[in-house]
Amino acid sequence: MPTRFTYEELKAATGDFQKKLGGGGFGSVFEGDMATGDKIAVKRLDSLGQGKKEFMAEVKTIGSIHHNNLVRLIGFCAEKLHRLLVYEFMCNGSLDKWIFHKEPLRPPLDWQTRRTIVLDIAKGLAYLHEDCRQRIVHLDIKPQNILLDADLHAKISDFGLSKLIDRDQSQVVTTMRGTPGYLAPEWFSSVITEKADVYSFGIVVMEVVCGRKNLDRSQPEEFMHLLPIVMKKDEKDQLVDVVDRSEDMQLHKSEALKMMKVAIWRLQSNYTSRPSMSIVVKVLEGNSDVDAELDYSVHNPAAMAAIKREAELGTTPVLPSFLSGPR
């Protein structure tokens, strides 16, 4: 089990929860300092959706998984009505701040850094899907849940919406959960496998290469969704038009286009056509090739109908576990 902290210890470590890093509907995250000098991120959960027993069970599950590309759960607090989680501190924040919210004083991510980030995420998902005792399906893969360390290496965070799938199960039936723009089409049948994460990952890769959000409500309707734009450009052999316009990305646009093709592979409407994450890792490392027989035309009526229904939802009706909530 991770370390158990008292509420007073975490209150002192965060300076009475003074420096807020982020937050959402389920709680807020604060920067803290341990007595050892190590920085931590403390998530204070605001609503009691679970009892202590269920909270402890989830802490045990999340605390037992260890991988270089997963944010480490250091400890927790379950004292009276207080429920807090203590994570390793990721000094460069979340990926969305680097690819969506460009700042004049911060240069855009270069191609090699983006490539490494994509590979890091793939390795983390491959571990969750294939190397744990129970398969763990994250169900909320998006740039806001990808955190970057001092060297801009990526780690997956926030397992609050995740589902465990026993090895003898091929799929799980669950209520819709996740974030609009990243939901696989099969969500509308409520039968989910780890391939839902593969789809979300494909969307994230597309965003990393293009440097814009997949679902951007500030855009006119015809430009709101990045996916159909990419599909139309692919059909016309004009994918280069959507690659991020930063100088280094343009210098590596041939490599970026190859990664876009791999992203499209993960976006197949039929989830059985999507590759496993271990195969994706091999392709990204150059040890395997994309299936030449794949149908890249994912821009079909069923998929687009699902995307439109998703957009109409505005916010996704979720029944999250108590550990959820964005950094």
Image: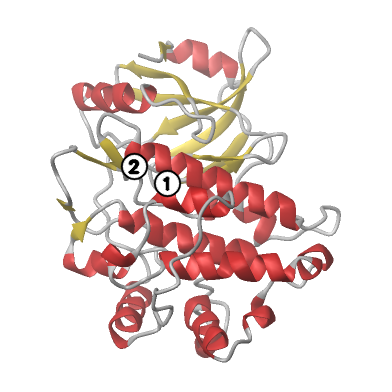
Q: Who's the residue at 57% across and 77% down the image?
A: 218
Residue 1, horizontal then vertical, whole percent: 35, 14
Distance from the alpha carbon under mark 1 to that under mark 2: 9 Å
Identify the mark nearer the N-term, 1 or 2.
Answer: 2
Horizontal arrangement in the rendering, residue 93 relative to residue 73 (left or right): right
Q: What is the number of callouts on the image?
A: 2
Establish if 36 lies above or below 85.
Answer: above
Callout 2: SS = helix
Residue 143 appears in view = yes
- Numbered mark located on residue 278 in the image: 1
Q: Residue at x 73, y 52 (%)?
A: 112
For this view, does 235 lie left or right of residue 114?
left
Q: Nearer the viewer, residue 110 or 215?
A: 110
Where does the image place residue 266, in percent across and percent down from the top left?
42, 64
Q: Identify the mark at residue 129; answer none if there is no mark.
A: 2
Q: Is residue 96 above or below residue 247?
A: above
Task: Name the front one of labels 1 and 2.
Answer: 1
Name the amino acid type tagged 2.
His
Tag 1 and tag 2, C-beta contact below 8 Å: yes
Q: Residues within 10 Å of mark 2 (few under 14, many from 20)?
A: many
Residue 145 locus on image (x, y percent): 50, 47
Which amino acid does the dot numbered 1 rest on? Ser
Q: Residues within 10 Å of mark 1 (few under 14, many from 20)?
A: some
| Residue 120, picture quadrant | top right
- In the image, 305 versus 263, the foreground residue is 263
Nearer to me, 87 or 117: 117
Q: Horizontally, is 50 left or right of 144 in the view?
A: left
